[in-house]
Image (cartoon, rainbow, N blue to C red):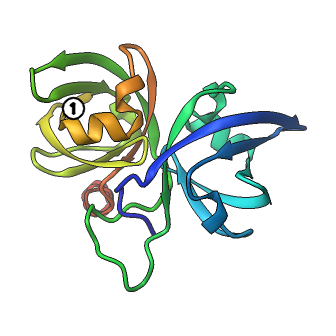
Amino acid sequence: MFTGIIEGLSKVEAIEKENTNVHFTFSCSFTHELKIDQSVAHNGVCLTVVKINGNQYTVTAIDETLQKTNLGNLKVGDEVNLERCMPANGRFDGHIVQGHVDQTGIVISIIDNKGSWTYTIQYNPKLGNVTVEKGSVTINGTSLTVVDSKDDSFSVCIIPYTFENTGFKNLKVNDVVNLEFDIVGKYVARLLNK
């Protein structure tokens, strides 16, 4: 389980295709603390560390992951948001995040509010995911509060600390982002549909 509190950015060092799988090699400031078989969220996608070599580590994404997330768009040199699993005795600072992306969305607007930024994300509502005002949503692994909820889009506000310390500073209009909707909201929506 994750909380959506980003620990840092990880840089793509290499990308190797093997059949339908892709092996991504990353570097980050705490690679020396990682272990083989550890789960780490990359832009909100839970992946298993399969190799560590110095300050670099490798994870593997299967075809389904590549089809349902923005990881297939990564290039060498790109940065992703990084979070390790929450320790059992850790502080719960964000919200319940599983590291299982529900769908992708598109950044349709970025507004500089001279002290914060408002990002508006559009998504396909036919997949059954919903947001609510002041509810939680995860964008590229970052736990955020919804400030404007519509049937096929929502907005979030980003404070300067989040802007500088996550991949939000690199996002542009039309970029694809990973979305994980609130787990409680997903269960409620599923029960109501029955």
Residue 121: image quadrant is top left
Task: Single out the residue that lies furthest toward the right.
Answer: 19
> Would you say 96 lies left or right of 69 here?
left
Q: Quadrant of the N terminus?
A: bottom left
> How crowded is the residue under tag 1: few (<14 C-alpha within 10 Å), some, or many (20+)?
many
Across and down, in percent, residue 138 comes to 34, 47
Across and down, in percent, residue 64 comes to 68, 43
The image shows a total of numbered marks equal to 1
Which kind of residue does numbered mark 1 sit on? Phe
> Would you say 26 lies left or right of 43 here?
right
Across and down, in percent, residue 12 comes to 66, 35
What residue does disc 1 label?
154
**Residue at position x 35%, y 63% from top?**
3
Q: Quadrant of the C terminus?
A: bottom left
**Residue at position x 35%, y 31% from top?**
168
Of residues 28 and 134, the one nearer the viewer is 28
